Every structure is written in C-alpha cells, then in structure tokens.
Image (tube, rainbow, N blue to C red):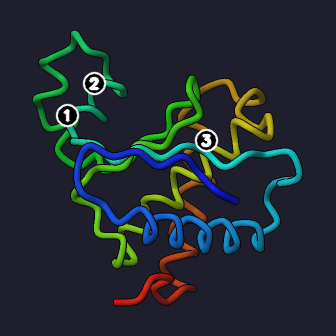
Amino acid sequence: MSSNITHSHSTDDAKLQNVLSNLLIWLENQNYFNYENIVVPNIKVVDVEKICSIAYGEDDRKIRHGKHCANIRGLYDFNNKTIYISHDVDLNSKKGQAIILHELVHHFQYESGEADEVDNINQLEHLAYFLEKKFRKQKSLLASN
C-alpha cells in the first residue's frame, strides 16, 4: 500500500509511509471495516492555517484565527480523499500517530459508506475517538523513538 504524500515543510516521506503502513495494519486488525476495495488516502503535511481554511472555509477569518484552530493538527477532507496533517505533528510520538489514525478512521468511514448512514457528520467522531483511545492504550510507538 502506498500513498501520495506531499508536504509544504520538510518531512521524512519514508518515515511517514512507514507509520502509515503500520497504522493501516493495526486498523485492519480491529475488524471495523471491509478493506478490500478501499484505497489508501493521500496525505498532505501543511500549516495549521491551511487545515483551518479547509475546515472552516477560506473566508471565515474570525473562526480561523480564533481558538477553534488552536488545537487542530489533522483533518480528513472527504471531497478529495486527503488527510491533512500539521507540519508540527511528531511522527515518533504516540500522540502524532494517533492523530493520523483518527483521520484514517474517517477515510474508511467515507470509503466504506458508513458516513452515508449518519444524520450528522459529528456522529462519525465516536468511532474515530474510540479507536484513537484504544490505539493509545494498546500500542507502543509504531515508529522508533
């Protein structure tokens, strides 16, 4: 499995690809989705400002510059099947890997059709946070420290 990884900041693509591969294996072992026809998402490493503009829109400067954007480090954009990760996410940390995992869950929710079955997009967060928490408790770091 290979993903198209692009970035606006220096990132070790091989390291990110390795983390992604290991997270996909972990996620597949959780048996929540049918993975047969799901392709790996693109990943873009960008500034938090870019993530906020995708999440809240280019024109909503009040929200983008407020506290809403202060803690965003990852986002899944289902329109272009791309995970956006902030350039300051540490791929060697369990927290950083959990952020990527959370966004991968959203990718699989959309690709499997689960997202079509909810009334509100926020209902998708429950499984993403559940698996993120399970990952943090269960797994030691997937990438070397």
Label 3 packing within 10 angstroms: few (<14), some (14-19), many (20+): some
At 43% from the left and 71% from the top, the residue drawn is: 15
Work out how far the residue at label 1 is from the one at label 3, CA to CA, in angstroms.
24 Å
For this view, does 44 lie left or right of residue 65? right
Residue 97 position, x and y percent, is: 44, 69
The residue where tag 2 is placed is: 53
Q: Of the residues under marks 1 and 3, which one precedes in the sequence? A: 1
Whether residues under marks 1 and 2 lie with C-beta atoms below 8 angstroms apart, the answer is: yes
Q: Earlier in the sequence, mark 3 or mark 2?
A: 2
Question: Label 1's element?
Answer: helix
Q: Nearer the viewer, mark 3 or mark 2?
A: 2
Residue beneath label 1, please? 49
Residue 100: x and y in percent read: 47, 58
Quadrant position of residue 51: top left
Assess disc 1: are there few (<14), some (14-19) or many (≥20) residues with their C-alpha within 10 Å of its C-alpha.
some
Q: Residue at x 76, y 67 (%)?
A: 28
Q: Residue at x 50, y 32 (%)?
A: 77
Name the image quarter holding the N terminus: bottom right
Q: Are marks 3 and 2 in contact (CB under 8 Å)?
A: no
Q: Amino acid at mark 2?
A: Ser
Residue of label 3: 124
Circle 1: residue type: Glu
- The kind of residue tagged 3 is Leu
Disc 3 and disc 2: Cα gap in Å? 21 Å
Against 40, residue 112 (above or below) is above
Q: Nearer the viewer, residue 99 or 18?
A: 18
> Mark 2: which secondary structure?
helix
Q: Position of residue 20 (x, y in %)?
A: 55, 65
Q: Quadrant of the C terminus?
A: bottom left
Count of marks placed on residues: 3
